[in-house]
Amino acid sequence: MRSARVAFDGAIHDAVPHADGLQLADGRVLAEDAVVWLPPLTEVGTIIALGLNYADHVKELSKELTQTSKDEPLVFLKTPGSLVGHRAHTRRPVDASFMHYECELAVVIGRRARRVKAADALAHVQGYTVCNDYAIRDYLENWYRPNLRVKNRDGATVLGPWLVSADEVPDPQKLSLRTTVNGRVVQQGTTANMIHSVAALIEYLSEFMTLEPGDIILTGTPEGTVNCNAGDEVVCEIEGIGRLVNTLVADTPPAV
């Protein structure tokens, strides 16, 4: 099963896919661009994000890194205010010289997990969705350690469009990922190239923190970082999960 949350006609609705776009819970069928898409979770808990979790991305940044595939996962937290939905606009700071997409598999926890072993970890997953977690390289304290204003910006983490139930994804480590900018392919990869698998991440995290329903794990991005500008349409796709569209707009400072 796959589901979404959208705003339409002054109310928030649950929705499911339809050949003509999407179907609301009350039966109405609407075009994809007739609604405002929201992150596909009723309640968002803690957002747990991974940096440098793809071997090819680590290799891509190897000249700037001290992090290796033998180190513990590089983890940081984000707040729900960073999230926007499918087809939303994300602001690009006017002083940024390098802002790029990050196509990521997002894992939604459905059952409390505490000290869970990897062999049992996927039983705690409610489902999966697509994430585009933008980064602004100018604002990094250094190239590979995400700081607060890089990774917790309002509206800079795009999520959706669908939450796909875990039973539709028999193996989250066998999914292809792709990003296009204005129709040009700029990033391709596979979840098989994760350094720490979804199950391993749940085991690692649940050893020292309790994962609750609604928590989201953003599992990192493959190689392929290209600067994007205001007006660019960025599409992140994950095999079997969905196609997430976002447009960058200029974040003009307020007039003095």
Image: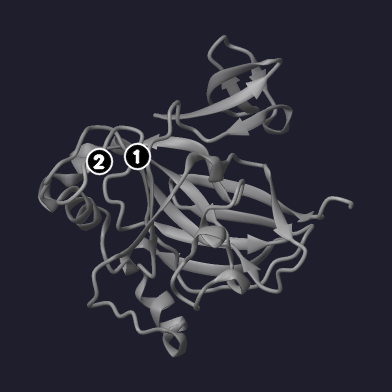
Q: Quadrant of residue 12?
A: top right
Residue 117 appears at what percent x and percent y? Answer: 10, 50
Q: Is residue 185 above or below residue 110?
A: below
Residue 200 appears at what percent x and percent y? Answer: 20, 57
Q: Residues within 10 Å of mark 1 (few under 14, many from 20)?
A: many
In the displayed structure image, the side of residue 168 where residue 129 appears, left or right: right
* Element assignment for label 2: loop
Q: Residues within 10 Å of mark 2 (few under 14, many from 20)?
A: many
Q: What colouring does the structure picture have?
A: one colour
Q: Quadrant of residue 99?
A: bottom right
**Residue shown at 22% from the left, 52% from the top:** 205
Residue 215 bears which disc, if any?
1
In the displayed structure image, the side of residue 98 where residue 168 appears, left or right: left
**Residue shown at 53% from the left, 36% from the top:** 39
Q: Quadrant of residue 169?
A: top left
In the displayed structure image, the side of residue 27 where residue 80 appears, left or right: left
| Depth order, front residue of 97/198 | 97
Residue 35 appears at what percent x and percent y? Answer: 69, 27
In the displayed structure image, the side of residue 91 where residue 214 appears, left or right: left
Task: Kindly check if marks 1 and 2 are in contact, taking CB atoms under 8 A apart as contact.
Answer: yes
**Residue shown at 71% from the left, 15% from the top:** 9
Instruction: Read off the residue under disc 2.
Output: 211
Residue 136 appears at what percent x and percent y? Answer: 60, 67
Residue that lies at the very extreme toward the bottom in this rendered image: 63
Rendered-image quadrant of the N terminus: top left
Q: Is residue 165 above or below residue 106?
A: above
Q: Is residue 199 above or below residue 127?
A: below
